[in-house]
Amino acid sequence: MCGIVGYIGSAPHAYDVLLDDLHRLEYRGYDSAGIALVRDNGALVRVRAVGKVAALEEKLTKRAQVYAKLGIAHTRWATHGAPSVRNAHPHTAGAITLVHNGIIENFAQLREEVQKEGRMLRSDTDTEVIAHLIDMAYAQLHDLADAVRAVLPRLRGAYALLVIAKGDPKTLVAVRVASPLVMGVAADALFFASDAVAIVAHTHRVIYPLDGEIVVAKRTEGRVSYTITTEKGALRKHTPRVLKWDHTQAQKEGYAHFMLKEIMEQPHAVTDAMRGRLDSDNATARLGGLAPVEERLRTIKRIIIVSCGTSYHAGLIGAQLLQEYSGIVAEAVYASEFRYSNYLLDKETAVLAISQSGETADTLAAVREAKNKGVLTLGIVNAVGSSIAREVDAGVYNHAGPEISVASTKAFTSQLIVLVLIVLLLGRQRTMSVAMGKRIIRHLCAIPRLIETVCQHHKEIRAIARRYKRYDNFLYVGRLHNFPIALEGALKIKEIAYVHAEGYPFGEMKHGPIALVEPSLPTVVIAPRDSVYEKNLSGIQEIRARRGKVIAITTHDAVDIVKHAHDAIIVPKTLPVLMPLITVIPLQLLAYEVGVAHGVDVDKPRNLAKSVTVE
Ligand code: AGP
């Protein structure tokens, strides 16, 4: 998730506007940054730097300030290609310079085509390939908008592009598909950005172009105008909206907290985690990051998953799925335990580290311990270029974008998606049938919409949170794939609302915890209609018989559970293997709303850090 910004106006201060705007977007990603400006004489100046925007500013101050009325800029959260100057945006090809936020799924094929045309590629990015394609079209059509329009049908994936051309100081073309883009409309200037936080500093009048719409911004003497058309050139009218957000609200896109924004972003996050990685024809997954070890993975008979906190709960589910669907012996171990234990490891064992930050000290130490023993190390990491991402032998990035809130939500669900993709890949190398692989892929594609459906229950969940906000203790229980979700739900309400909660396998209740059950101890039961439905129903009845309160996370066909629970949150059904992606959402919202009700700063809870880089 990168940050792109653009400016076209009658005043020559693109340089200052774009740098200020980049700072406002820096929370979206900051491994490198760059700016490109077109002077009135048509000369194009481009400067890029590794690191935060400050590194770019430092480089810029060493050059004469450029006065320009047109420019674009970018702060990068790497997806293709490590953080470096040559991979930093803006990318230039011939007369064309552009910035991009998104992922082009078919970029390898397009890259080959461009190279066959004799073009030299200087970076590892998908973005540079787009620049070459547009430049080739521009050489034929001599019109920037037409050149962009000619290329779009060939791009598959997500993109928000801002495109300018050397020699044309009066035109900026913007387009988006599946990546965010907003245009600010001021009297004598137009501002473009990935999100409104970089716009509201200049104007509150905004237009959000729809997917596939192309904005052509033009500067004629003294004024700036724009047209919006479809890919085919049909005119589209948009009336600017007036945003009531201030700068801070805009960074959260109007949500009260980053945590809520990131919970609601999960349909996009899980979509991005799957993007370009589903191979429906072969009923498997395409994971470029594992390609170098794909053959070696065929010999792996055991996987130990090492991680902490929420990532450990993802690992528990991953271990269950690997055993059930890939025929691999798997277990999840707390990284802080693994690193000091003496696990028997051999050449048929792999160690898989899961970490949002890629900097968690215990998980990094576990990876190093595994490497010391000569074991294949794999990673599922969100932060590109982080220590764990660099040190494992191979890995898969979540592509969830920066997760600002201390509580891990969209990183967790995108970790689950990547785990299912790895299970697909390894399963189809072993005993998983084409039919099962296709079935999983079909249901995976529906997950974003199902998560969206659950998010629509937010008001109902807020009401439940308000009814239970005075309780000091909770039990969370579930079975099979929903037992780790019980642990995750308990962790969320602990860390976000400072309420004590314990997660248990539901079958364990009668081995002790049921002694706690009384009216003052609610039990959250994750119990969709599945193979253990009857067991869950009798467990709920045992709790009710002791006047315990039950909040059930269940499905519409679990009629008896709905009847016996005090409160029930109905979630849509999918394959049991994918239900954790759905049942976790109400628990995230429940913890969030109880935390808000308690007046907790839910984005920065006390005593916690977003990345635990100390032991
Ligand atoms: C999750 O909500 C917590 N903030 C915490 O448990 C976190 O999951 C844990 O510290 C692991 O972090 P990582 O995924 O960055 O390694």
Image (cartoon, grey):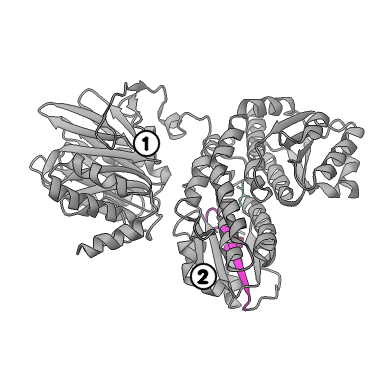
Q: Is residue 412 left or right of residue 47?
A: right
Q: Magenta segment: does it hold 351?
A: yes
Q: Which mark is residue 211?
A: 1
The disc placed on residue 510 is: none
SS at mark 1?
A: loop
Q: Secondary structure at mark 2?
A: helix
Q: Amino acid at mark 2?
A: Glu
- Residue found farthest to the left: 41
Identify the residue shown where x is 58% and y is 46%: 408
What type is the residue that disc 1 sits on? Asp
- 520 sits left or right of 120 in the view: right
- Using the rendered view, name the quadrant where residue 366 is placed: bottom right
Residue 294's tag is: 2
In the displayed structure, 208 sits above or below 102; it is above
Q: Is residue 89 magenta?
A: no
Boundaries of the magenta span: 347-365
Residue pictured at 31% horizontal, 57% vertical: 110
Residue 190: give x, y in percent of width and height. Answer: 24, 30
- Give the quadrant of residue 342: bottom right
The residue sitting at 63% across, 41% down in the picture is: 582
Q: CA distance from mark 1 to mark 2?
A: 36 Å
Say if 371 sits above or below 408 in the image.
below
Direction front: furthest residue: 435
Q: Earlier in the sequence, mark 1 or mark 2?
A: 1
x and y, in percent, of residue 124 in the image: 33, 61
The reply to whether residue 305 is in sight is yes
